[in-house]
Image (tube, rainbow, N blue to C red):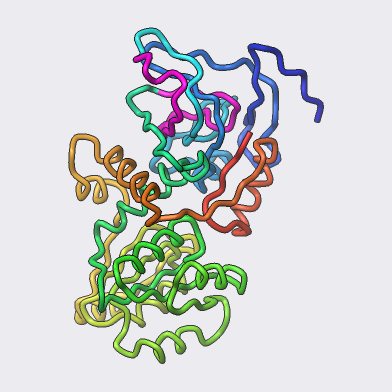
Amino acid sequence: MTITPVGPADMRAVLLHAFGPAENLSYESVARPVPAPGQVRIAVAAAGVHLLDTSLRRGVQGPPAPLPELPTVPGREVAGTVDALGPGTDPAWLGRAVVVHLGFAPGGYAEYAVADADRLHAVPPGLDPATAVAMIGTGRTTLGILQFAELGPGSVALIPAAAGGIGTLLVQYAKAAGATVVALAGGPAKTARAAANGADLALDYTAPGWAGTVRAHHPAGATVLFDSVGGAVARTALGLLRDGADHLVFGWSGGPLVLTDADRAGLDARGITTRGVLGPAMLQRAGGDNPLRLLETRALAEAATGRLRPALQRYPLAEAAAAHRDLESRATTGRVVLEP
């Protein structure tokens, strides 16, 4: 691809002109955005890539984000340095290291992005931009999920997708709380990562016999299942829970969990509670006037103290298409981040 030279008022960005495969993401030279009143412009050092981004790129609309108007610059999470202010914006932001979740406004896959000043967080000292980006998105979701779990000594947490972005943080948090962690991951490499992250038992859920190994180590059963996978893995994992356990659902990357009426009756009889923990339930549990911002602040603080350390997989901004392909094929580990 031929890239036109970047002039003093230009930047490089990843654009989507038509919905479709990852190859539709093109690396181009475009004009730098200009901040509107109450906004800042950020010289981007890191931009988050989310699985939702890949769905929007394909033109698949679903909650919570609407399809963007085309052409668009994808990406909703960035960290970097404020280099310009819109009219009426507090001048104290100029030159500061910040991180921001852009909400439903795209624009993150670029060398410069604009954001509303009231969404900004100052990056805590010692945090690099990629870590800050991971915590503003994946971190806030993780802490939102953890609001529904009571973890401590005596708890046994069963965590599928334990080498992913959220799974990595769940393992760390549960261990710090004194819980025993059973991590499930797909393939030897991801299983090894989960073990290195502190899991007490790390198993490959693509290999036969993993459920028997869990039962042998924890015959009383797990107290909580953090379920982002669904499908056959979740169905098997439900059989590894003790009476009164919690089944917290926040994804279905392995397909829907199909339960018969008899299955549900059996779970009810054992006092196992299944609940979806995303969306309104998470916001209501967080409370406050701006629950998402509250969770973002907590997530950044957890990273600043070192209690939570996100796993990162970094790609150059120009390789956004490769990042999308790898994310969709589950070839990534941890949070995917683009760096200009």
Q: Residue furthest right?
A: 2
Q: Is residue 70 above or below residue 139?
A: above
Please report the residue visible at 36 percent of the width from the left and 87 percent of the height from the top: 218
Left-right relation of 160 to 108: left
Please report the residue visible at 55 percent of the width from the left and 37 percent of the height from the top: 46
Residue 181 x/y as whole percent:
38, 74
Please state which of residues 222 and 95 is positioned toward the viewer in this rendering.
95
Left-right relation of 210 to 339: left
Q: Is residue 29 above or below residue 221?
A: above
Q: Quadrant of the N terminus?
A: top right
Q: Residue furthest front?
A: 126
Q: Quadrant of the C terminus?
A: top right
Residue 21 x/y as whole percent:
66, 43
Residue 332 found in image quarter: bottom right
Please state which of residues 255 and 209 is positioned toward the viewer in this rendering.
209
Q: Which residues make up the magenta segment?
A: 90-115
Residue 15 found in image quarter: top right
Please state which of residues 258 and 171 is positioned toward the viewer in this rendering.
171
Q: Is residue 318 above or below residue 215?
A: above
Q: Residue furthest top?
A: 87
